[in-house]
Amino acid sequence: MNKFPEIKFGTDGWRAVIADTYTFENVRRVSLATARVFKNHPKIENGIVIGYDTRFLSKEFAAAAAEIFGSQNIKVFLTDSFVTTPTVSLLSRDKNLAFGVMITASHNPYQYNGFKLKDEFGGSMDPDEILKVETELKDINEIKEYKKLEVLLREKIVEFINGRKYYIENLINKIDINTIKKANLKVLYETMYGTGQNTLSEILQIDQLHAVFNPSFGGGAPEPVEKNLGEALQTIEKGNYDIGIVTDGDADRIAIIDEHGKFIDAQKTFALLLKYLHYYKGWKGKVVRGYSTSDIIKKYCDKYGLELETVPIGFKYISKLMISEDILIGAEESGGIGIKGHLPERDGVFNGLLYLEMLAKTGKSISSLKKDLDDEFGIYIYKRIDVHTTEKLKQETLKKCSQLKVGDKIGTKIIKEIGNLDGFKYNFENGWIIVRASGTEPLLRFYCETNSSDETQKVLEETIKSFKL
């Protein structure tokens, strides 16, 4: 019987608590499983890239992974400093490598670390390939023999690469930096102690918040949601800034704060970028959205004749389409946005620069751009509540959800239509609610949108209460 715990990859990689399941031993096991699965990859002779974030021991975990891949005679380009996840995606694609590995737990609390796999095209690894890695892992126990990093460096099987420099040069070539500079915008970048720190500041004169190495993230979680941004909101409100840009721990997700210190939710962040790219820049292509995103995206696409595809929750589904189709923009509900011509992947820093370009070229403020959107399409108020519960209550709630029919009530709302692309979606007179379970823990997620802030909160509270959670 295998003494090692089962390792499962979630919506975006394997994540676990450091020193519990996330150990050097298990990182080595996952690395060996990955090496075995991709040993016959057509680009494996070109090698792979490994990067890491600012978490506790990430640099050392990345080195441990490099030792295993290198010991399997796979060429490894190991970043010489912490980098953003999109950096690994870019290097994987642009250097014609087999795949990329990123040691990160993204926006999770500081106790966690993780292992993301990026494919040769620079996007999230296909779920079918991830399943092969999980299957291979079952037969791998403790790994006792492997070459040390210093030996592999001497043998030139492992080589350091300046990923940070490559990434910044890539950004400069894709954004109208000169126009941004001429606009003389006052910008605050809240890095959340993550890998985005000192990237924008290499390109533009900006102010940064929490741009220091702090593996505990100040005792919180580097997730760009309003409840975590009190200091940034106050700083912008008092400091006469034009915009606040926020990225998460590995800088693939973005949040925006307007010039008054007001948080712009991820749905409006998505919609504003869509309008800028399509209406102002004249770009074409299909729009892809995650199942739990705002209906304002559908209204925009309907009005302007853009093709829209809705996919299950998880950027891997968006990434897959961006690789094979002409996608203008693809986004999930949590601030992960991929843009045509850049990567089939989320990139918070790149999207932040697009926002600066938007302000510079339109000459408008964030609040006025948002008002234009509201005036054109109406008010949409979106909220999400995560409920930690027991596995028993989680399963009982899902069973109740499966039994609801059109005409029944969800909370106090009469159900007009039901969808089940990912979880349970119930449309009612002036909005909708989704109930979706985590696949890895006893957690239920409730997403809701109506045209009133009080109404959205009320629907969420009454629905959760109706399930006795």
Image: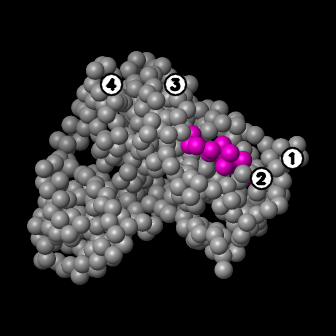
Tell me the SS state at disc 1.
Answer: helix
Q: Position of residue 225 (x, y in %)?
A: 35, 44
Which badge, 1 or 4, is on the more N-terminal residue? Answer: 1
Mark positioned earlier in the residue sequence (1 or 2)? 2
Looking at the image, is mark 2 or mark 4 earlier in the sequence? 2
Q: How is the image coloured?
A: one colour
- Does 46 appear above or below 177? below
Q: Which dot, 3 or 2, sits closer to the camera?
A: 2
Badge 4 density bin: few <14, some 14–19, many ≥20, Cα 10 Å? some
Q: Is residue 51 magenta?
A: yes
Nearer to us of marks 3 and 4 is 4
Q: Is residue 205 left or right of residue 53?
A: left
What is the spatial separation of the Cα atoms under label 1 and label 4, in whole angstroms?
A: 48 Å
Q: Which residues are magenta?
A: 46-63
For marks 3 and 2, give the CA distance: 33 Å
Q: Is residue 211 magenta?
A: no
Q: Are marks 2 and 4 in contact (CB under 8 Å)?
A: no
Identify the residue under disc 4: 235
The one nearer the camera, 18 or 363, is 18
Q: Amino acid at mark 1?
A: Val
Can you tell which mark lies on residue 411?
Answer: none
Which quadrant is home to the C terminus?
A: bottom left
Residue 186 in view here: yes
